[in-house]
Amino acid sequence: MQRSTAIIAAAALALSAAAAAAAEYDLAAYLAKVEAANPDLALARYDLEAAEQGVKQARSALLPAVAAQGGYTRNLGDIEQPKAVAADPATGAFIYQEFDTNYDNELTLGLGVQQRIFDAEALARFEQARKGRTAQLSVYEVTRRNIRSSAKSLYAQTQLAQAVVAVSEASERMAEENYRSAERKFRAGVTTELELLTAEVDWKSKIPASAEARKNAELALVSLKNLAGIPLAEGLSLTEDTSRLPEAPADPELEAVLAARPDYAASLLSKEIADISRRAAYGSFLPSVSGSFSYGYYLGEGSEILPKYDQTSAKLGLTMTLPLFAGGYRLSLMESARINQEKAATSIAKKRDSIERELVSVRLRLDEARRRVDSALLVESTARKAAELAKTSFANGLATQLQVTQAATNLDQALLGLHNARFQYKSAYYDWELATGRQD
């Protein structure tokens, strides 16, 4: 008995220490944590950085290309050739002598500069890369807003799961108290065995319900931590006031919504990119002009018969290239660009209709959720009064145990309905924020 008491005390102490060490997060703090540590947002940032590098790579085609080259050669072996140095007076034949005919040391230096003066296709590709970077920024903003909206809903859902745990555990404790009270009255001969058994069944049937509620709350908390990159072993306490609901918003104008939606902006940018691609296809028919400059230096020394030799050269060139025939590739490129333009225009119209339908749908959900909250508040207030009256009547012998149990069950259902209605309203409100492009 003493050992069991010690174990329970130790467990209670550990739970108290864990609760004391739990980090507190209101909704704003949790959203900040999500933006800082969410892995999907980190991947989106990498895509944004990659788009920035794509702009730099496209720009490099418009900048001068500079190359330098240098070389040194030390000839370890001599190349000898015979050379006439005299003539035999008797025969008149030449007398030859071997001489070193190559340099011992050779030095070469070179510098070249190549610059595109006009290239319509390269200019269009650069502009396309810049638009692509802007489009990727819109995609990142879409990802960020979607994740924030999901984080808000998951935060509210976790609070709902924890509220269900609180209601279930309170209901279990109340059922146990009712059973203990019925047990005492049965022993005193005041109540019947049927009422005692009814109270016992009601109490014990709530035990597995409480266990399931705790499991669901733990699973929701795991998902909440994963979304924000919080270690699972870290304690977490949600401090946002669940009873405080945002006010029902007014409907904005459609054009204002479209201007605030980054996904719609991305659709518009896709059309601009398609337009640039078509200009790039046209540019493949135009001539390209490039200029070049080269400088060279050569030094040779260390030969028996060759004098020291150095030479400097410099050249400036201008080249124009006119493409004449590419097997129909450029014509096909223009047709593909035209198809992409029409596809982008259709996507914009489709996106506009989708956003308009989404606004109507989320507005209906929001209004219905608001009415459900008002109704749940009335039901909860009525059920609470009924439970209190049943408890008082039972204590005075004017009500049965079954009536008390039924009133308590109705109150539990009313509390759960109120918590769920608040969650549904918050979820609909977060979807409305996302649909209207509102930034918090």
Image (spheres, rainbow, N blue to C red):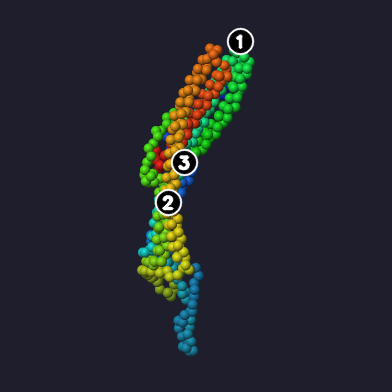
Task: Quickly name the residue at label 1.
Answer: 188
As drawn, 216 above or below 384: below
Identify the image quadrant of the C terminus: top left
Residue 297 position by quadrant: bottom left
Residue placed furthest toward the front: 398
Place of residue 343 in the rendered image (x, y in percent of width and height, measured from the top left): 45, 55
Report helix, strand or loop for mark 3. helix
Place of residue 276 in the rendered image (x, y in percent of width and height, measured from the top left): 40, 58
At 59% from the left edge and 19% from the top edge, which residue is drawn?
199
Residues under labels 3 and 1: Cα distance? Answer: 61 Å
Residue 118 position by quadrant: bottom left
Q: Residues within 10 Å of mark 2 (few under 14, many from 20)?
A: few
At 40% from the left edge and 45% from the top edge, which residue is drawn?
261
- 9 lies left or right of 66: right
At 37% from the left edge and 41% from the top edge, which residue is drawn?
252
The one of 52 and 240 positioned closer to us in this rendering: 240
Place of residue 43 in the rendered image (x, y in percent of width and height, measured from the top left): 48, 46
Task: Quickly name the residue at label 2.
Answer: 349
Task: Quickly name the residue at label 3.
Answer: 147
Q: Is residue 19 visible?
A: no
